[in-house]
Image (tube, rainbow, N blue to C red):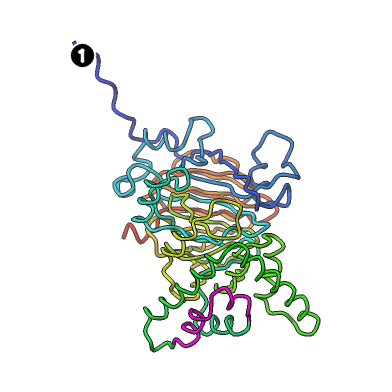
Amino acid sequence: MAGPTPPPPEEEPSSPSLRLRCAVQHYEWGRRGEASLVARLSDANADDHGPDPARPYAELWIGTHPSAPSSLLADGLLRDWLARHPAALGPAVAARWGGDLPFLFKVLSVAKALSIQAHPDKDLAEVLHALRPATYKDGNHKPEMAIAVTEFRVLCGFAGIQELKDVLRTVPEVEDLVGPEDAAKLLSVKGYHGVNEVKSCLRSAFTKLMTASKEAVSEAITKLIFRLNAESKVRTLTEKENLVLSLEKQYPEDVGVLSAFFFNYIKLSPGEALYIGANEPHAYLSGECIECMATSDNVVRAGLTPKYRDVQTLCSMLTYKQVFPEILRGVPVQPYVRRYTPPFDEFEVDCCSLPPGELVVISPVPGPSVYLVMAGEGEIQVDSMPNGEKSKQGDVFFVPAYTEVKFSASGPECMQLYRAGVNSRFFN
């Protein structure tokens, strides 16, 4: 005889606002101790004696990715809770993304450059994950957006054809590694030759550089540094040349130092953002940012890293588009709130700056949200809760779909919050 039927999974969230405990990643490139925003945010809710001054605090992860999943303060992993409460995602999100949070929200504190890298599109991610699951940990794509909290420096996308021709003419060390045939092709290509011919020449030249022998790269960098140090006594070096000198100190004899000449060099001011699609090369260089992306940890690396390099995959997967990234500054959606909307369904980010004594009401949305208190203090009130909860720097909340949220700032300074949610365009 069959036993009793198990009860169906509970549908309605039992508590409208859920505090999260979030994981920190201690990658070597992170800022150390109290100098790291990640350390200060994570320490605000820790029981220990503050950040270790010798330890790097690189990334704070907010989400369900298995590499560093968030948990509810009183109820285990957020991912498991969502499996028991699918209504918290809203029907459209649950149907599209299989009962999981489609975005991963992070804070980054960058002291030294991250790798020259790109993130695969969905099809390539599935192939790489099947081939090398230890390196490529999931089968998802990873479009992303970075919002500067401090000045944030980035290499992103290939520079325009004229700038690349100037590199070949003025940086003999790069021209030598690219080789006379590929250098000549790139130098003679014209815009009217068509996009595909330009891309083909660029792909060939870049691949030559990235696959040069270790000895050739080492010799080229030695010559470059010697030349730039000598020339700096008689002329002002360009921003890109100064960048290359600083990258060489961080990653001696690394081909990524030379590859920097091929990319757009961008300095984001606080509040400015850029987004990066699949198969686009980039490297974060320094500063602190809020980052949001599709739930994935897939990175194909080829330079500026001690980690595994997959140079052939990177060189073959890139789009070789030459476009300066669009800089977003956030669009006001209500008093005190600006929204950053990238062209990806999985996510958008709101920034709320609330002066002392002010209140903001965030209307219900048909998908889940996570909120991070970046600075200041105040109170959060969710739906029809009679009383608010105190909230301060470092607090992180998960808020289910169709839930109204009120924040009020009560301290002497502005209360600053960031919200990540599913892109509003997805619901339209």
Q: Taking the image as drawn, is residue 376 in sight?
A: no
Disc 1 on helix, strand or loop?
loop
Question: Predominant secondary structure in magenta?
Answer: helix
Residue placed at 45% from the left, 44% from the top?
A: 399
Residue placed at 39% from the left, 37% from the top?
A: 82
| Residue 280 % position (x, y) | 46, 65
Residue neighbourhood size for the residue with mark 1, other residues' Cα within 10 Å, grouped as few (<14), some (14–19), many (≥20): few
187 to 45, vertically: above or below: below
Label total for image: 1
> Quadrant location of the C terminus?
bottom left
| Residue 194 % position (x, y) | 37, 84
The residue lying furthest to the top in this view is 1
Residue 384, picture quadrant: top left
Residue nearest the observer in this picture, 333 or 70: 70
113 to 325, vertically: above or below: above
Queried whether the magenta region covers residue 177, the answer comes back as yes
Q: Taking the image as drawn, is residue 116 in sight?
A: yes
Queried whether the magenta region covers residue 87, the answer comes back as no
**Magenta stretch in the rendered image:** 171-189
| Residue 87 % position (x, y) | 34, 40
